[in-house]
Image (cartoon, rainbow, N blue to C red):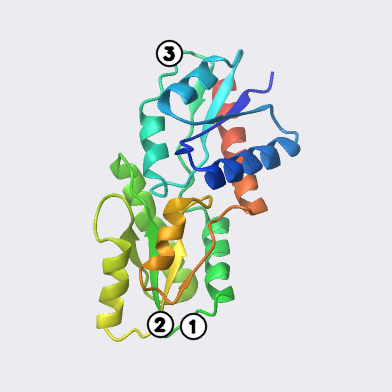
Amino acid sequence: MVPTMVLVADDSQDTDRTEALRGLADAVARRGEAPVVPAFGSDREVQRAVHSVEGPMVVVPAYVAGGDLASSQVLAGLDLGGRFDALHTAPLGAVPSIVGDLAARLLATGWTSGDGVVLAADGSTGQDERQAVTDVARMLSRRLGSPVQVGYLNSWAPSVGDAVERLRRNGRDRVAVATWRLVEDRDYERLHDLGATTVTAPLWPSEIVVDSLLAQHRAAKARLAA
């Protein structure tokens, strides 16, 4: 029996975010590899959706590590009730194909090697996700052949705005923000008001994201079967 993939994220009462998340869930389901249950909403709504799933399941975060503080809090509070036929994966982190896509998005906005780069993350409840953001920044820096600063929107320091300002003080007239978040929402719109020259779009829509989520599900399915 193929475990159900339960995609988990906070939807923050944000209609654009909810629409994007449901579009992602539909795209994963269209691949036909596994039944897909979207669990988007508050802690209680996510818990209810998870408990409604019968049979084996894999809970897959519908966000990137360090890229969605609210969803990280939802996942941290999720109780699988000690089920032997259920587990959850870590959020997507420094996946080479995703970081490569992010580098391509920067180049498409007109970034050149003389420009500054800020990787705009959000924050998280755990240090594992903070380390993942650091790993992404290092991988992106290697891809670009240029330094990459990290900034955060909703927790940790420095803030995205501070990181942009620091690069300008250090002589970078043009600063690009590389958006480290999966879907468009109100927080993404804030990035356009922080003084950067350009801001990349969120990582979804992209078939690379769908591929990566399904790869996580396949790896978890193998662990459940072991």
223, 15: nearer the viewer: 15
What residue is shown with label 1?
112
Residue 52 position in % (x across, y down) = 57, 15
Quadrant of the image containing the C terminus: top right
Q: Residues within 10 Å of mark 1 (few under 14, many from 20)?
A: some
Quadrant of the image containing the N terminus: top right
Q: Residue at coordinates 45% horizontally, 65% vertically from top-left? A: 178
Cα–Cα span, label 2 and label 1: 9 Å
Q: Which mark is residue 81?
A: 3
Q: Does residue 125 appear left or right of residue 86 in this picture?
A: left
Q: Nearer the viewer, mark 2 or mark 3?
A: 2
Three-letter code for the amino acid on which mark 2 is drawn:
Arg
Q: Does residue 96 appear left or right of residue 171 in this picture?
A: right
Secondary element under disc 3, as helix, strand or loop, is loop
Three-letter code for the amino acid on which mark 1 is drawn:
Thr
Three-letter code for the amino acid on which mark 3 is drawn:
Gly
Res. 75 visible in picture? yes
Labelled pair 2, 1 in contact (Cβ < 8 Å):
yes
In the rendered view, tell whether residue 112 sits above or below residue 209: below
Q: Residues within 10 Å of mark 2 (few under 14, many from 20)?
A: some
Secondary element under disc 1, as helix, strand or loop, is loop
Q: Residues within 10 Å of mark 3 (few under 14, many from 20)?
A: few
Secondary element under disc 2, as helix, strand or loop, is loop
Q: Which mark is residue 174?
A: 2
Of labels 2 and 1, earlier in sequence is: 1
100, 119: nearer the viewer: 119
Cα–Cα span, label 2 and label 3: 50 Å
